[in-house]
């Protein structure tokens, strides 16, 4: 199945109904997130006493008629959030259902955030980014971009994120994190770049629960290195311990960066992932 086939109108209708509640930093713009700063939007916030220099168009003349005192209306300023989606396109992310799940999750998040009038930037490693997506009308362009991604080779998330000029905001990293990166260093780097970190650990069911079987030769899909294995109970137990340590390493790194961790099996419903991520 292709991304365009998976990203259906039913998905889009469901996404329209979901309410975003990301606790994110915002920048000046036209989005729907409410800021404590007082601006010029139409939503009333509070009153304060009139002082010399205030515009007379903001004076509340009804209050003046009742109290014979000048008050100025304050309005809640609405701001636009920056959302940076980083997709790991290394070879291991092309295994099983992870590629399509990463593309579909990215498309859904992009559509939902732009419905909220936020600005979305998609960074696929080893690929020119797609930036400044600020309208749902550009979702077709985002889908085209995501469908053309190639998942191959190796990647250091730290080294590829270092040069990115990320706008202050939220950063959603979609990866299996099967890299040699120090996870604490990775998420610390994103926090240093003024990002609210969301780590989506995307794993295939085979990654999570490999089956027992006969002797086999496994090949690393990124380095092509081979290894003879006997997937018996003892080997699977060691694998499970290593996987648990891997997930704990990611979760601890995210926690130190005051971010949020989400484990997302590749067969998990996209809307459920999004609810866990942003609600």
Image (cartoon, rainbow, N blue to C red):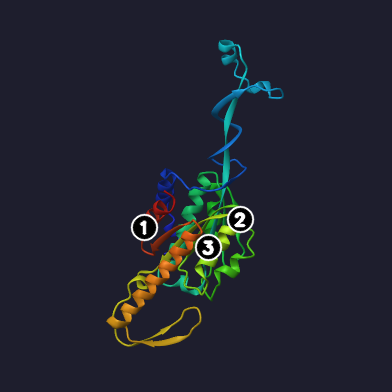
- When the figure is inspected, residue 100 is found, relative to residue 152, above or below; the finding is above
Tell me the number on the disc at residue 187.
3
Mark closest to the chain's N terminus, 1 or 3: 3
How far apart are the alpha carbons under marks 1 and 3? 26 Å
| Residue 183 location (% of width, % of height) | 50, 68
Is 249 situated left or right of 239 in this image? Answer: right
87, 107: nearer the viewer: 87
Which residue is located at x 55 percent, y 44 percent?
117
**Residue that label 2 marks:** 131
- When the figure is inspected, residue 249 is found, relative to residue 239, above or below; the finding is above
How far apart are the alpha carbons under marks 1 and 2? 27 Å
Which of the 4 image quadrants contains residue 194?
bottom right
| Residue 241 location (% of width, % of height) | 35, 75
How far apart are the alpha carbons under marks 2 and 3? 22 Å
Packing grade of label 2 (10 A; few <14, some 14-19, many >=20) is some
SS at mark 1 in the image: loop
Mark closest to the chain's N terminus, 2 or 3: 2
Which residue is located at x 43 percent, y 48 percent?
15
161, 85: nearer the viewer: 161
Which residue is located at x 58 percent, y 44 percent?
80
């Amino acid at each position: 199945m292709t991304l365009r086939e998976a990203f259906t109108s039913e998905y889009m209708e469901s996404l329209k109904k979901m309410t975003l509640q990301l606790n994110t930093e915002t920048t000046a713009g036209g989005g729907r997130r409410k800021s404590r700063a007082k601006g010029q939007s139409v939503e009333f916030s509070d009153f304060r006493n009139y002082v010399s220099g205030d515009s007379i168009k903001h004076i509340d003349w009804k209050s003046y008629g009742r109290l014979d005192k000048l008050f100025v209306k304050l309005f809640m300023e609405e701001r636009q959030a920056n959302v940076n989606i980083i997709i790991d396109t290394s070879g291991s992310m092309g295994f099983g259902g992870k590629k399509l799940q990463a593309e579909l999750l990215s498309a859904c998040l992009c559509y939902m955030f732009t419905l909220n009038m936020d600005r979305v930037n998609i960074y696929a490693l080893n690929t020119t980014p797609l930036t400044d997506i600020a309208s749902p009308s550009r979702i077709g362009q985002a889908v085209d971009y995501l469908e053309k991604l190639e998942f191959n080779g190796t990647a250091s998330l730290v080294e590829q994120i270092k040069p990115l000029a990320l706008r202050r905001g939220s950063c959603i990293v979609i990866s299996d994190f099967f890299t040699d990166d120090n996870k604490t260093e990775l998420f610390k780097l994103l926090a240093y770049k003024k990002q609210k970190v969301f780590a989506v650990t995307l794993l295939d069911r085979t990654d999570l629960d490999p089956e027992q079987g006969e002797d086999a030769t496994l090949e690393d899909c990124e380095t092509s290195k081979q290894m003879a294995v006997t997937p018996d109970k003892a080997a699977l137990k060691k694998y499970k311990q290593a996987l648990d340590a891997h997930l704990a390493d990611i979760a601890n790194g995210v926690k130190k960066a005051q971010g949020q961790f989400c484990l997302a099996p590749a067969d998990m419903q996209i809307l459920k992932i999004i609810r866990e991520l942003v609600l």
